[in-house]
Image (cartoon, grey):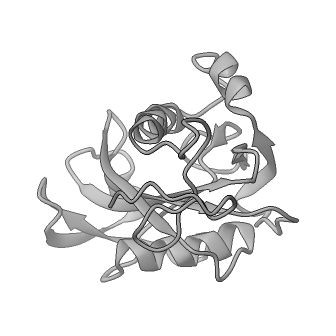
Amino acid sequence: MTGSAEEIFDIVDEEDRVVGQAPRSRCHGNPALIHRAVHVLVLDRSGRLLLQRRSPRKDIQPGRWDTSVGGHLEPGEGYREAAIREMEEELGLCGLPLTFLYHSRIRNAIESENIATFLTCFEGAVDFNPAEIDEVRAWASEEIEAALGSGVFTPNFEQEWGMFRDWNRRYPTRGGEGVAFCAGETFPDLFGGLGTDKE
């Protein structure tokens, strides 16, 4: 989210309980200030992952390719609410079903984030926010694998990709290949109608 007023984040403890608030400028640069973020993975029918190239004006990892959607929670906001809001703000996507995948943590010298990642599927034109994003495109898994470690991606995305691969191995489609596209809190294949019956 980009605006004239500085963003304020809820500060949380290791158990994700809110313990205070701080401005974005203090959170980015002080890893002691744990804050919340959300990621959304947007895949198409063939399992290609939509990635965004971050604007060169971003304060963190400018110009690198990153997760489809990523953003911070507003004070008092829930993870799912933030995912829906960020998906619309960054890509202009509304009304898509979201399935929660997993929680994760990022801890580095710049920041500390507690993250919830969601999955959705979409094919069509994306109206991305040029203040946040330089371009978007769909990447095949083979392309992503070939570019890992080259500096093309943000470190956070490379961590996300590893977690998503692990998740996908646990919840394959009935044929054993591809992504089990999800709606709501269950794991049916939205495109093929095949479910794994796992929650």
Compared with 181, 147 (above or below) is above
- Rendered residue at 32%/33% (across/down): 109
- Left or right: where does residue 22 sit relative to residue 121? left
Instruction: State which quadrant residue 91 falls in.
Output: bottom right
Q: Quadrant of the N terminus?
A: bottom right
| Residue at x-position 86% and y-position 64% | 124
Total numbered circles = 0
Q: How far across and down, in percent of the image, does residue 108 sit?
A: 32, 34
Q: Is residue 100 above or below residue 49?
A: below
Q: 77 or 126: which is nearer to us?
A: 126
Residue 73: image x %, image y %? Answer: 40, 71
Q: Is residue 64 above or below residue 19?
A: above
Residue at x 68%, y 20% (from the top left corner): 147
Could you tell me if residue 116 is visible in this image? no
Q: Residue at x 40, y 77 (%)?
A: 74
Foreground residue, 98 or 93? Answer: 98
Is 76 on the left or on the right of 68, as rendered?
left
* Position of residue 130 measured from the top left corner of the image (x, y, whole percent): 80, 62
> Could you tell me if residue 186 is visible in this image?
yes
Quadrant holding the C terminus: bottom left
Report the front residue among 131 and 84: 84
